[in-house]
Image (spheres, rainbow, N blue to C red):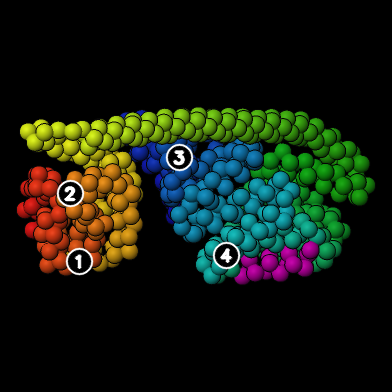
Amino acid sequence: METRPDSALSILESISSPQKLTRAERAYYAVLLTQAKHKNVIPLEDDSLIKTAVEYYGDRKKSINAARAHYYLGATYCDKGSISFAVDEYLTAIRLMPVKNEFLAMVYDNLAECYEEDGLGDVAMETYRSAYQILKGKSDQAFPLRGIAHIFLLQNKKDSALCYYYQALSCAMEDKDFELIGALYHDLAMVYNDEKDYVQADKYISKAITTLSNEKLAYACLSKAKIQFNLNRLDSASYYYSKDLNQLDIYGKAVSYDGMYNVAKKKGDWKTAMENLDTYKMLYDSIQTTLDNEELTRLMDKHQLEEHKRLLTEHNKTMLVVLISAFLALLIISSFCIMWIDRKRKKRYIDLQKELNQNRVNTMLLDEKESSMSEQESINEMKLDLINQRLKLCSSLFQPSDCYKKLEAMKKATPKQMLDMHHLVTDIKNGIMETFVDVMTSLSDSGEKNLTSDDKLYCMLVLLQCSKPVIMELMGDTSDAIKTRKNRIKNKMDAQLFNFVFNSNNQNDRVN
């Protein structure tokens, strides 16, 4: 592909059934075939082939193949005259290119040519400079240098243009790129011709003619003819105007016949002058028709681009409205869910409070009830049952609280982790005493002697199934102090209630 693109094209075209390739292979084949045609200067008039690669590689993920696919689609648009679409594809190729290499520089160079064609000289200049920064010190750096020089020439900064043309010529000579050397000789000749330094112009155009070939040679001969005309060498000008006439396109032929008309007129050969003028007018009319068609195509492409942008903008607006609507709907639904959950939680909390109040009433009724010794045991059992119910109700109120989460975290903590949780002790103790105040009051009222606040807290920690290390941490007591406290509580508390607190569910085994 790099050294013999004609052979590459022949090999690719010899594949008889590309449709039998896998999707990935077809995409790669499309890139290679378009690249080979582009390198062989075959006009890329059909974009259906390269679009298969663009669709496969996409425009999201960076990759060399994706960048190449978009670049060659841009080159196809360029060949079709759709400059705006070409610019979009070149910019996409730049965005998708994962590395800065010679290919990226080529994309910048072609993008700059599009900007130049659209009359965006300053933008084209910066784009050429981007290509040069990548190629600086490497081969092919002459191309962006030549582009920069051409922009300076268009801006009528001829000294700067000459400076960059000479830099480009030096780089081209180092690379031994003779076609580019010939083209740069031609460029220098045109600058000197504009400066009316016809001797220098003739010097460089002569060098260009000896270096260039094919169509470029024919155009160099046209330039040579203009310079000879300016030097008043009419026979030489006439010779170069008519030389390689068949190799020129319609524009070149029009320039050639116009030049021959001027030469013949200056010689006084009016018959030849009129014949050349008639041919020129015929070519000019044909060119004008072509230009009108191209302008119409350009306007249609511009309209298509604007329509595409409009549809894209409308689509984006629609998507934005949909996203905002979905967000608001989700926000409203979430708000209703939160309100419903909160209402349900509050209702449960109120129900628990009602049950707790009823429990208090039942306890007061039992306390006021006069009974015989035979009935006292039954009443005590009922009181224990009410305490147990009260414990469950308070536990239900306790579980949603932050204090419960902190206590559970302390239960699961290792001894080392528990040292870092010492700052939670006060919050946990206060939370337990506030939530289980009814249970702690019942424990005190059911004892033979009043229990201290620490005694009641210890009883609550046992009922909440806290391990001995947790109780020691929360109480701030040693193991021996805990045992002493338990014995003291046993002497103060009713035996049946003591068994309820310390012996139910093997609590005694867990604490001791």
Callout 1 touching callout 4 (CB < 8 Å): no
- Residue type marked 3: Gly
Choose mark 3 or mark 1, whichever is in front.
1
Identify the magenta region. Answer: 157-170
Q: Give the mark toward the camera: 3 or 2.
A: 2
Which circle's residue, 3 or 2, is located before the other in the chain?
3
Left or right of residue 26, residue 110 in this image: right
Secondary structure at badge 3 equals loop
Three-letter code, disc 4: Gln
Spatial CA span between label 3 and label 4: 28 Å
Residue bearing mark 4: 133
Badge 2 is on which residue?
Answer: 447
Q: Can residue 117 be seen? A: yes
- The quarter of the picture where residue 339 lies is top left
Comparing 79 with 103, the one in front is 103
Task: Look at mark 1 in the image and give the residue it sits on.
Answer: 477
* Label 1 secondary element: loop
